[in-house]
Image: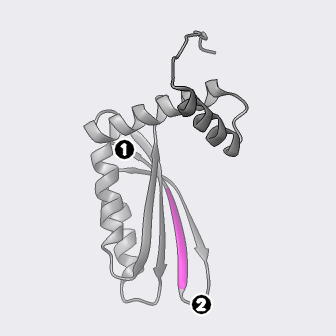
């Protein structure tokens, strides 16, 4: 476990009150955890923006599996990609639509390229990406 360091922060009263209201709605038990999460998010955003390090993430896709060649194109993307794909989950939403969830890892540029490529496949109705870092 990491050593804990205490430090003080000076904020305008109205900003602190708004922050307390927000973190209370989010279920945080204390300010320390909320501030630590904000710092981590900022560091992840910086790694994403600068292309430094490695990120892990989840790609979600909803697609019509009846659309010509959609499944084959998505599989080819997965096999040809430079990201590491740890796991996939395939869910049949209804007769036409499937949800696919992929757990991936790679450089920010590789992950972004892979995610963008899934969006452009004909038949994909929606594709989303959530990233984080194993470093934090």
Which span is picked out in magenta?
97-102
The image quadrant of residue 71 is bottom left
State yes or no: residue 101 in magenta. yes
- The x, y position of residue 8, in whole percent, is 55, 12
Residue 117 in the figure: left or right of residue 95: left
Tell me the residue at 35%/68% (across/down).
Answer: 118
Q: As rendered, which of 88 and 39 lies closer to the eye? A: 39
Q: Secondary structure at mark 1?
A: strand
Distance from disc 1 to disc 2, alpha carbons, whole Å, reads 33 Å
Residue 38 in the figure: left or right of residue 108: right
Task: Rate crowding at label 2 as few (under 14), some (14 to 19) or many (20 or more) other CA atoms within 10 Å.
Answer: few
Q: Secondary structure at mark 2?
A: loop
Tell me the residue at 44%/73% (across/down).
Answer: 126
- The x, y position of residue 113, in whole percent, is 28, 56
State yes or no: residue 49 in magenta. no
Which mark, by number, is residue 95? 2
Cβ–Cβ under 8 Å for marks 1 and 2: no
Residue bearing the label numbered 1: 106
Tell me the residue at 51%/23% (across/down).
Answer: 11
């Amino acid at each position: 476990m990491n050593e804990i360091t205490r430090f003080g922060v000076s904020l305008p009263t109205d900003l602190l009150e708004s922050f307390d209201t927000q973190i209370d709605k989010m279920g945080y038990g204390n300010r320390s955890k909320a501030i630590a999460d904000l710092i981590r998010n900022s560091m992840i955003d910086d790694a994403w923006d600068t292309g430094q390090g490695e990120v892990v993430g989840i790609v979600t896709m909803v697609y019509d599996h009846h659309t010509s060649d959609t499944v084959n194109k998505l599989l080819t993307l997965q096999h040809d990609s430079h990201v590491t794909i740890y796991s996939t989950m395939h869910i049949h939403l209804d007769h036409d639509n499937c949800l696919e969830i992929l757990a991936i890892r790679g450089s920010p540029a590789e992950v972004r390229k892979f995610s963008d490529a899934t969006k452009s496949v004909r038949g994909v109705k929606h594709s989303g990406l959530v990233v984080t870092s194993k470093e934090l």
